[in-house]
Image: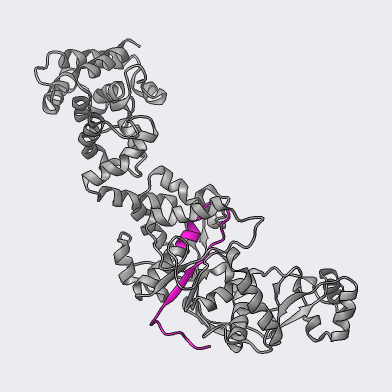
Amino acid sequence: MNTTSLAGVRVRFCPSPTGTPHVGLIRTALFNWAFARHHGGELVFRIEDTDASRDSEESYNAIIDALNWLGIDWDEGPEVGGDHGPYRQSQRGEIYTDVARRLLEAGELYESFSTPEEVDERRKAAGQDTKLGYDNFDRDTTDEQKAAFRAQGREPVLRLRMPDEDITFADHIRGEVTFKAGSVPDPVLVRANGAPLYTLTNPVDDALMRITHILRGEDLLPSTPRQIALFQALRRIGVAESIPDYAHLPLVRGEGNRKLSKRDPESNLFTYRDRGFLPEGMLNYLALLGWAIADDRDIFSMSEMVQAFDIGKVSSNPARFDVKKAEAINATHLRALSQDDFVERTLPYLANAGLVAEKPTDEQRALFTATAPLIQERLVVLSDAVGMVRFLFESEEDFAPEPDSAAKALGEDAKPVLDAAIAALEPLAGWTTPAIEEALKAALIDGLGLKPRKAFAPVRVAVTGRTVSPPLYESMELLGREKTLTRMRHARNT
């Protein structure tokens, strides 16, 4: 087949609206987007929603939400419009009916009356495996036989007549791929009730929307010869101008190299958004699922990806979704945020946890802004801030050290430490970080002769409620003298 020129690139992202957006699905959207942007082409967003029993408006909205959150924009499709709409297959029924009629009249499709049971019986009679599927038996059914079948109440499906020669195509990732003649049975394109199947609608839409390159998952590779055969037929009847190029992306697998299914919580994109992944962190990691900007570089922006993206450099090996690596990449992007940006992105997570108002007060915003430089370097995802700063925003009635932290640091051995700390802090004239640090070190390290870990762990847990917190002295200054000493006394007497 001819290779399409990279001039005038048009690719498509065409999910079915079932379930929640899957990280593998969004990786496919990202690679299509990057390919289109790299070549100055266009991304068509199409919704394949002809299965009324599985498709849902909720899932459709979730896909839109996911793309908008990540900043993956499209040039044609829902919410945007374009010259090749409608962009939802449920609204394109008349188009499919017309194309199917033309294909049937041209002899590219034929009526098939065989039932699955009859196909199995013929395979068994010939000593063949029934898993081979349809045997192309109805290709030459006569008009008299068709009339007899209809008289019995049978209605035919419409099948595509596959070519009698090998189908070979150049995959941009996998190289030359060949399907031998006769290895793919004639597929059903239209059900007996007239409803078009994916095998018809997908290539028809690609043809009418002038798609030049199809970047899709490796699991769809077995359907490629059927698509190419249909494109050839569509060209013969004047519907398609050319046959698109193909690139079959590596599968995304989970832990233990298992297939990452839609039902796996690890695959749900919104799980990561809810935890506080940044869009740029998630996109950066998804880009690494099968592609690399350089052998020694994992961190990059989307503009850098677009500039460097080469579909021929995508690996053909399965990619493993590694949550720990995704977190590490997200943490790097999080640390790179400006302080103001970090504050604005984090406040909604504090509001969701009930620590600040949905529209934070000036006092709440100022307190978190002062805390931000102390925690930004320590976070992996934005929601980590909730645990880090809870002690600053909770009322004294609600505040209590975490049970595990209290058990580790607030035993009997902690009482003399807290007594000494309270005695050192009470007379301080100025409640500042340097003054707090000097007083505590003098009382606990010099006075009691303690190692820093033993000296400060009880104070940290008493004041912040956790063994891991923002820097201790700065935390105490932000909390204030009265609350700090009240909490230390309470921990001492508990």
Question: Could you tell me which residue is drawn at 50 percent across and 53 percent down?
Answer: 61
Q: Is residue 295 visible?
A: no
**In the image, 441: left or right of 32?**
left
* Scheme by which the image is coloured: one colour
**Residue 103 position by quadrant:** bottom right
Q: Position of residue 321 (x, y in %)?
A: 47, 56
Looking at the image, the residue that sits furthest to the left is 429
On screen, 414 above or below 245?
above
**In the image, 23: left or right of 18?**
left
Residue closest to the eye, 118 or 404? 118
Residue closest to the eye, 330 or 79? 79
Check residue 16 for magenta coloring. Answer: yes
On screen, 337 above or below 31?
above
Question: Could you tell me which residue is drawn at 58 percent across and 69 percent down?
Answer: 220
Considering the whole magenta stretch, tell me its main secondary structure: loop
On screen, 29 above or below 480?
below
Instruction: Pick the quarter of the image with the C terminus.
Output: top left
**Residue 127 position by quadrant:** bottom right
Q: Position of residue 448 (x, y in %)?
A: 19, 18
Looking at the image, the residue that sits furthest to the top is 493
Q: Position of residue 161 (x, y in %)?
A: 70, 83
Q: Is residue 334 visible?
A: yes
**Residue 305 position by quadrant:** bottom left
On screen, 122 above or below 284?
below
Q: Position of residue 106 (x, y in %)?
A: 68, 87
Q: How many marks?
A: 0
Residue range highlighted in magenta: 1-28
Question: Could you tell me which residue is drawn at 38 percent across and 82 percent down?
Answer: 7
**In the image, 409: left or right of 132?**
left
Check residue 165 for magenta coloring. Answer: no
